């Protein structure tokens, strides 16, 4: 913990991290060296071509893997899998034998929420992602977009201040993807959660992020670290995308992504 009370502890701190898969001749350096500090309440988007280490970095932050060298800290501590962060993957990974409400209830149980409080919390969480009327349905009875909303509600069930999202909208159609982007932007703004979000999409990065980090082709290093100075409330999505500043950011970040990928 910092000794100075005015110093704000980073939500995520990645210090000189490298990560290598395999050994000997088969060794592949996927990431680093890379250092990144994430401020509490910010929405950081990692963007880059396939193979640049975005998902690897997210797994290291989640504690699913340990760095080969360097250190990762979440809230000042070494990350522990399943604790300290809500995680949303590209696929919802719901339990099909449970109802929508049952999936959220399980997350609340693991978060230590007392049983009498859970029904109210389930309704609150599903309402937050626009699913207040499907709690009793099985997960296979709802659409892919709705399933991903359930996954987000489940990730919000704990008291963790950190939300990690690994291309959660990549498999969805364009219209559903845009709707969920708007929902996620609103939900995270209301809750004040810190987010680290992985995507290939430059438009998604600019729309969602308060900060965009572009990674180079393997091994992933930071090619660009840019604060996004766009209004995060009071402006509708269509109006936001029509702003000249929005178009300028898309151009700058898109060019950097192409150059970081080696012009591919």
Image (tube, rainbow, N blue to C red):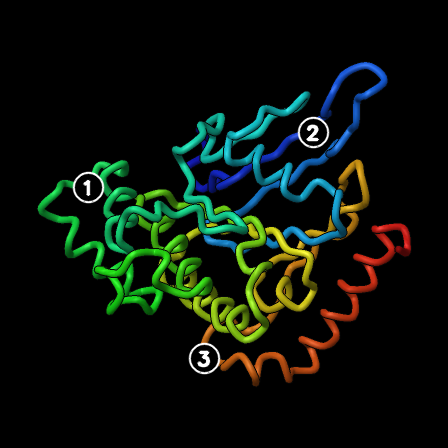
Secondary structure, mark 2, is strand
Q: Position of residue 51 (x, y in %)?
A: 75, 43
Q: Which image quarter: residue 69?
A: top right
Secondary structure, mark 3, is loop
Secondary structure, mark 1, is loop
| 2 in relation to 221, above or below | above
**Residue found at x 47% / y 30%:** 76
Would you say the residues marked 3 and 2 are in contact, meaning their CB atoms lie under 8 Å apart? no
Residue 54's label in the rendered image is none
Report the mark closest to the observer, 1 or 3: 1
- Work out whether residue 8 or residue 26 is closer to the camera in this orientation and state it: 26
Residue 113's label in the rendered image is 1
- Work out whether residue 229 or residue 235 is closer to the camera in this orientation and state it: 235
Report the mark closest to the observer, 1 or 2: 1
Report the quarter where the N terminus lies: top left
Q: Which residue is mark 3?
A: 234
Q: Position of residue 168 (x, y in %)?
A: 53, 55
Q: Which residue is mark 2?
A: 16
Disc 1 residue crowd, few under 14, some 14–19, many 20+, Cα 10 Å: some
**Residue found at x 54% / y 35%:** 61
Would you say the residues marked 1 and 3 are in contact, meaning their CB atoms lie under 8 Å apart? no
- Work out whether residue 46 or residue 152 is closer to the camera in this orientation and state it: 152
Report the quarter where the C terminus lies: bottom right
Q: Which image quarter: residue 175?
A: bottom right
Disc 3 to disc 2, C-alpha distance: 38 Å
Q: Position of residue 131 (x, y in %)?
A: 31, 66
Disc 3 residue crowd, few under 14, some 14–19, many 20+, Cα 10 Å: few
**Residue found at x 74% / y 48%:** 50
Would you say the residues marked 1 and 2 are in contact, meaning their CB atoms lie under 8 Å apart? no
């Amino acid at each position: 913990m910092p000794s100075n009370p005015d110093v704000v502890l980073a939500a995520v701190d990645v210090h000189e991290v490298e990560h290598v898969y395999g050994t000997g001749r088969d060794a592949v350096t996927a990431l680093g060296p890379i250092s990144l500090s994430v401020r509490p309440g910010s929405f950081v988007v990692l963007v880059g071509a396939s193979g640049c280490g975005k998902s690897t970095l997210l797994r290291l932050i989640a504690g699913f893997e340990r760095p080969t060298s360097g250190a990762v800290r979440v809230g000042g501590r070494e990350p522990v899998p399943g604790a300290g962060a809500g995680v949303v993957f590209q696929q919802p990974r719901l339990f099909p034998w449970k109802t929508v409400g049952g999936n959220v209830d399980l997350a609340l149980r693991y978060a230590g929420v007392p049983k009498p409080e859970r029904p109210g919390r389930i309704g609150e969480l599903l309402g937050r992602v626009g699913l207040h009327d499907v709690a009793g349905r099985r997960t296979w009875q709802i659409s892919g977009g709705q399933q991903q909303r359930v996954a987000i509600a489940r990730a919000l069930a704990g008291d963790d201040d950190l939300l990690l999202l690994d291309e959660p909208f990549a498999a969805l159609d364009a219209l559903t993807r845009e709707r969920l982007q708007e929902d996620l932007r609103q939900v995270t703004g209301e809750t004040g959660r810190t987010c680290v979000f992985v995507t290939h999409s430059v438009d998604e990065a600019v729309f969602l992020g308060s900060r965009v980090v572009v990674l180079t082709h393997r091994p992933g290093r930071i090619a660009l670290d840019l604060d996004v100075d766009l209004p995060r409330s009071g402006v509708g999505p269509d109006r936001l995308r029509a702003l000249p500043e929005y178009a300028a950011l898309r151009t700058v970040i898109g060019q950097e992504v192409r150059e970081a990928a080696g012009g591919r």
